[in-house]
Amino acid sequence: MTPLTPEQTRLAANALDRVLHAFVEEIGEEPTLGEFLEILGLSFQPDEDLLPGAPFPLLLKAKKNGNRWYKAEPSEKVASLNDNTFTEAGDFLNLLVAGSGADPAHPLSVSDLADHVLGVIQAGDRAFSDIAARDLEALVAPAAKKTARVTVGDVVAIPAVPRGHHLAVVLCEDRMGTALGLLEGVFSPPRVGDVGRHRARHIPVYTGPRLIKNRTWQIVGHHPELLELFPDPPEVYWQAKTSWGEQYGEYGGAGKLDGPIRLLDKAEADAVGLLDGTYRPTYLEEYFQDVLNEGRFDNGPAPRSWL
C-alpha cells in the first residue's frame, strides 16, 4: 500500500470534516462510529479496475484497543439523511483512492482503503459521539465474494447516466430469465430508505442475472415487501397477431407464462411498447442498462393499475 503524503492526508481530513459537518447540520449531533461507517458503506461506489472484488455496501467493522470488537448500536438516523452527507462521504473515499496512486496495474485492496480511512481519522484525533479515534486499533473490511447470489426480494442498483443509480427489486427467476421490478427515480446514494415511499416505474422487465452475480449491478438490500408493487408472477406481453398466427384482440394480450391470456386496451398496449414495436419480452443485461438510461421504461402508468 502506498501511504498518503502529508498533503493528501490534509485534504482527506478536510473532506472527512465535511462529512461530519453535513451529518451534524442535519441531525444536530455528532455521529457514532457505527453511523459514520454505515454512511461510508452506502456512499461507496467501487471502480472494479481500481478496487477489484470490492463489496457493496462496504461493511467496515472496527476493533478497539486491546483487540476488542466495537459494537454499533442500532440507529435510524442514517436512513433519514438527505443526499448531502452521502455525497461528501463519497468524495472522501474517492480522495483516498486517488491519493493511494491506484491504477489497473496496481489496484488497491479494500483492506488498504480501510487502513487509509483509519489513518485519516486518527491523524486529526477526531472523536465520534461514542468513541475517540485514539481508542481505535483497526478497521476491518469483509472478504469479498466472487459472485453474488440472487434472491427474490433483493434490491439491485443499476448505474445511471450521468450519475446515481436506478433501483430494481428481483421478482422471480424462471425460464424467461430474471424479472426485475423497476422503482421510480434515480438514487444517489443507492439506498432504499423508507420502503413506503417507492412506486413502481414500469411493468416487470426480464433480463439475465450475470451483471448481478459479477456485482456490476450491486445488491444494496433485501426488501421483499416491495414485491407487492408488481404483478405476481410477472406477465409476458404478446402482439395482436403473433408470428405463429395467434390473434389477441385488436391491441395484443398479456398473461403469466403458464396462464391464460387477457386482451389489452389501447392505452396499456401503448404504454408497454407493443404499438410502437419497442416492447421486448427479455433484454440482454448491457442493452437493458442502456435503454433504461435512455428512458425506455419511463413512459407507462404504474403497473399497479394493471393488476
Image: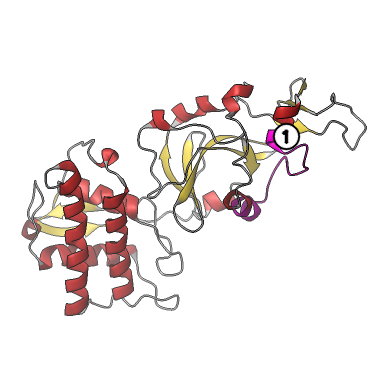
User: Which element is circle 1 on?
Assistant: helix
Report the residue at 17% width, 48% height from top: 25
- In the image, taking residue 10 as reference, residue 244 lies left or right, namely right
Relative to 185, say whether 251 is above or below: above
Q: Position of residue 101 (x, y in %)?
A: 33, 78
Q: For residue 194, what is the image quadrant? A: top left
Name the side, left or right, on which 209 lies relative to 31: right
Q: Position of residue 42 (x, y in %)?
A: 33, 49
Q: Position of residue 284 (x, y in %)?
A: 67, 51
Question: In this picture, which residue range is highlighted in magenta?
Answer: 270-290
Whether 262 is drawn above or below 157: the answer is: above
> What is the quadrant of residue 119 in the picture?
bottom left
Residue displayed at 32% across by 59% down: 90
Q: Is residue 282 magenta?
A: yes
* Res 34 visible: no
The colour scheme used to paint the residues is secondary structure
Q: Residue at x 19, y 78 (%)?
A: 7
Nearest the eye: 144 or 192: 192
Q: Amino acid at mark 1?
A: Asp
Residue 22 visible (yes or no): yes
- On the image, which quarter does residue 48 sit in? bottom left
Q: Quadrant of the N terminus?
A: bottom left
Q: Which residue is mark 1?
A: 270
Q: Where the C terminus falls, by quadrant?
A: top right
Nearer to us in this view, 10 or 49: 10
75 w.r.t. 159: above or below: above
- 148 or 263, which lies in front? 263
Query: Is residue 142 on the magenta stretch?
Result: no
Image location of residue 165, percent across then percent down: 46, 50
